[in-house]
Image: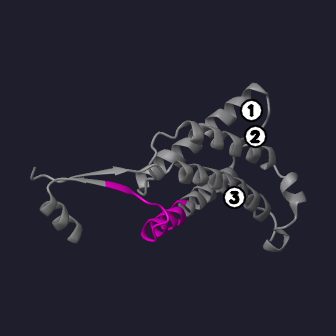
Amino acid sequence: MNRIEKVLQNDDSAYIYFVKIFKTFVIFLSFYLFSILEKNSIHEILDKEIFTTSKYYQFSIVSMSFYFVTSILFIQNKTYRFNFISFMKEDLIIIFFSQILIFSVYFLLNKIFIIDLGYLYLLIFLLINLFITKKLFNFIYNYMINNDIIHKNIMLVGNYKDIIFFIKN
């Protein structure tokens, strides 16, 4: 047998669920910060009353819930992905579908939500925060791999000399 095969068995489910929970918190925090900073200063950032009376309060709770549920339902892989396409697929599409679901529910309940320029700024702010969070978790994942906190199981198949050569190189 002159051929060496490498099989990676990697299950990052716990890390993926942790990232999804943290991103849900980032969504809520983005709504909170934007609703306060939209009309107030940074000095009033701890005033929860401003957030609870803003037009984004109920929308943030519903948006955060829909994001969490849809992101948990759409988990397909058990491996953590680093690339930008995974960010597009996991976050942007889920945000898009959750916004459609929210507006559908608002329409059915006859609730009014005005989409204005502030809402578009909020979505841009939210997407930037989610992108930064993705980069942060990429860094944390690389750190955990490099420091053997997360182990990857590798099985090498081949003859003894080829395996020793592969391990040395």
Magenta range: 134-154
Which residue position is annotated with label 3? 30
> At x 58% / y 57%, what residue is drawn?
130
Residue 9 seen in the current view: yes
> At x 83% / y 56%, what residue is drawn?
51
Question: Mark 3 vs mark 2: which is more N-terminal?
Answer: 3
Question: Mark 1 and 2 residues: CB-CB less than 8 Å, in contact?
Answer: yes
In 3D space, how far apart are the residues under numbered discs 3 and 1 (Cα atoms)? 21 Å
Foreground mark, 3 or 2? 3
Q: Residue 151 occupies which quadrant of the picture?
A: bottom left
Foreground mark, 3 or 1? 3
Question: Mark 3 and 1 residues: CB-CB less than 8 Å, in contact?
Answer: no
Viewer-proximal residue, 13 or 30? Answer: 13
Secondary structure beneath label 3: helix
Image quarter of the C terminus: bottom left
Which residue position is annotated with label 1? 106
Q: Where residue 42 is drawn, which disc sits there?
A: none
Image location of residue 4, percent across then percent down: 17, 54
Vertical relation: 60 (above or below) 100: below
